[in-house]
Image: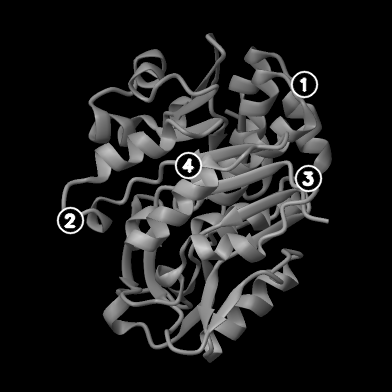
Amino acid sequence: MAQAVCVGESMALFVPAEPGPARQVRTWRRTVGGAESNVACHLVALGVPSRWVSAVGADPLGAALLDELAGAGVDVGAVRVDPERQTGLYLKEGDAAGSTVRYYRTGSAASAMGPDLLAGLDLTGVRLVHLSGITPALSRSCHDLVTALLRAPRDGRIVSFDVNWRPKLWPDGDGPRVLAELAGLADVVLVGADEAEALWGTGDPAALAERLGNPPAVVVKRAEHGATLLENGTSTSAAALAVDVVEPVGAGDAFAAGFLAATLRGDDPRTRLRSGHLQAAATLLTHDDVAPPLPADVVTRLLRADDADWAATRLTADGLVPA
């Protein structure tokens, strides 16, 4: 039985399978990309049974996407297969400095999702519902779906909302207002300080929480500088782990999963933040959006480390070395 349900679009993701400029690449590797399915995969790897809820086309990419997520242990039984619309896809060209991403998602099956999806969604035993700010930008019906989930009775579960600011998805300029309204309905809000500055003019956790109507928990991520959790008026910060970055894309989803898994375990605030950093670090070491967790002994050692030992450690492809 799923303990977490992640709702949102995922697409077929193509990344170069050889070096060089994209226009010269002849071989591409297909995988899966999408904020909510990324989080679901991470949660499963961290021991939290998870279900991904979305829609895909009745096409080979949709079938491949379902096969890959199911192979990662994610429950895909509630995914709708749309016979009329296609599965979205995107291309990613990335390196340590960042990535160029090109989306081909207009009219996708997932963009047609709406509140009617909830009629067949069984949340029995679910402790966490995870959403992102990408979904409400896809269509009016997707916005209504996210709103319905955020306004639904909690029945003991928490609803997390990762802002995931994508300016190109909000050409009408409504993003700041809509995302503030939705984030204000969540139990846990996750946002990058740079995103918050662009959206609402502040990356300060206290000012941001007030801007959003003081949700129970707000996590502000500052990339390599760490993260701060403001929860019920108490602020806790944790430095990021030093990492030899291969590519940054996907690290935010990994952080969210690590933090949320630790939240479900009932861990203390610093452990929850460090758990997010550790899962993000594992993904930063790869070109993939989802990477396996770090070895259990490494995680245990670092979660128990004092601040000096944590700061003196660097994670590389070969393991831990002095920073």
The amino acid marked with disc number 2 is Pro
Query: The residue under label 3 is which amino acid type?
Result: Pro
Q: Is residue 153 left or right of residue 248?
A: right
Looking at the image, do the residues carrying marks 1 and 3 touch, with CB atoms under 8 Å apart?
A: no
Question: Closer to the camera: disc 3 or disc 4?
Answer: 4
The residue that label 3 is drawn on is 295
Query: Could you tell whether 266 is left or right of 85 in the image?
Result: right
Q: In the image, what residue type sits under mark 4?
A: Asp
The residue positioned 51% from the left and 34% from the top of the image is 186
What residue is disc 4 on? 162
Q: CA distance from mark 4 to mark 2?
A: 20 Å
Res. 171 mark: 2
Farthest top residue in view: 234
Amino acid tagged 1? Arg
The residue sitting at 40% across, 69% down in the picture is: 111
User: CB of mark 3 within 8 Å of CB of mark 4?
Assistant: no
Could you say which quadrant of the image residue 255 lies in? Answer: top right
- Distance of mark 3 from mark 4, alpha carbons? 26 Å
**Element carrying mark 2:** loop
